Image (tube, rainbow, N blue to C red):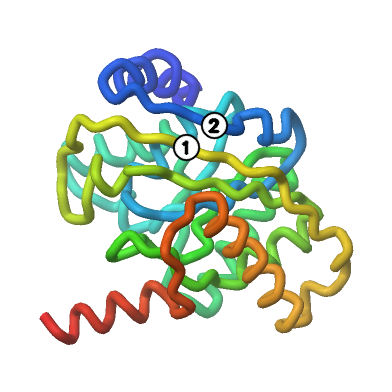
Amino acid sequence: MLYWLMKYVFIGPIVKAIFRPWIVGRRNVPVEGGAILASNHLSFIDSVMLPLMIDRRVAFLAKSDYFTGKGLKGWATRVFLTGTGQLPIDRSGGKASEASLNTGLQVLGGGELLGIYPEGTRSPDGKLYRGRTGIARMALEAHVPVVPVVMVDTDTMMPIGQRLPNVVRVGVVIGEPLDFSRFAGMEGDRYILRSITDEIMVALQRLGEQQYDDVYASTVKDRIKTKA
């Protein structure tokens, strides 16, 4: 109920009136059943804008740290994230990664849409980076298609580190679903998972024409921190 109130009564109408977001390819989102929306990741606001532009409910896996704030601000953040379809997960690795996978599989098993950022983190400079193979494993285990999604100009709307958005028009481009059923039962093969993930990233690059760099975005972020 909170999700629908936020989307259609509170946040949705206001955001659409101010920022006038546009969308191309909405028909490529399956009208029913589970599916993964694989998106590039330019800004924190991506997880808000994409669900607002899709007719169906979209769940995103968000860092659990976002839900643990104190006081009124912490409460408001939790309400906002929950109301926009964010699910808290631990991203510390190991068993936490397995728990994240299981949470995503539960969403897909319930016939819902799951939003995933294959790069694993926001792009630090607007480039598209190498994808993490968790998305491939999830697609094979859940037996669902992967729909490539490109967010446009959200980094201009809300750059990393900025608290309030700039009033600029942003967009969403949705490509045709990718079917990986030919690899059914091969989710334990790391070479297959890498091949699937690379295919997803190629689809994203072609759809958005971002410059691609075949390294992990987290590695680039670490380099930037080291130089700072």
Label 1: element kind: strand
Q: Name the residue under label 2.
A: 24
Q: How many labels does the image show?
A: 2
User: In front: 57, or 158?
Assistant: 158
Mark 1 and mark 2: span between their CA atoms? 6 Å
N-term-proximal mark, 1 vs 2: 2
Q: Residue at x 18, y 86 (%)?
A: 226
Residue with the most extreme left position: 228
Question: Where is residue 179 shown, x and y percent of the image?
Answer: 79, 54
Residue 25 visible in this rendered orientation of the protein? yes
Dot 1 amino acid type: Val
Q: Nearer the viewer, residue 23 or 96?
A: 23
Q: Is residue 101 visible?
A: no
- Quarter assignment of residue 34: top right
Amino acid type shown at disc 2 = Val
Q: Tell me whether circle 1 and circle 2 mark residues in contact (CB < 8 Å).
A: yes
Q: In this view, does 147 lie to the left or right of 69?
A: right
Specify whether 55 is left or right of 221: right
- Residue plotted at (87% across, 70% down): 185
**Quadrant where the C terminus is found in the figure:** bottom left
Depicted 155 relative to depicted 102: above or below? above
Is 122 rendered above or below residue 71? below
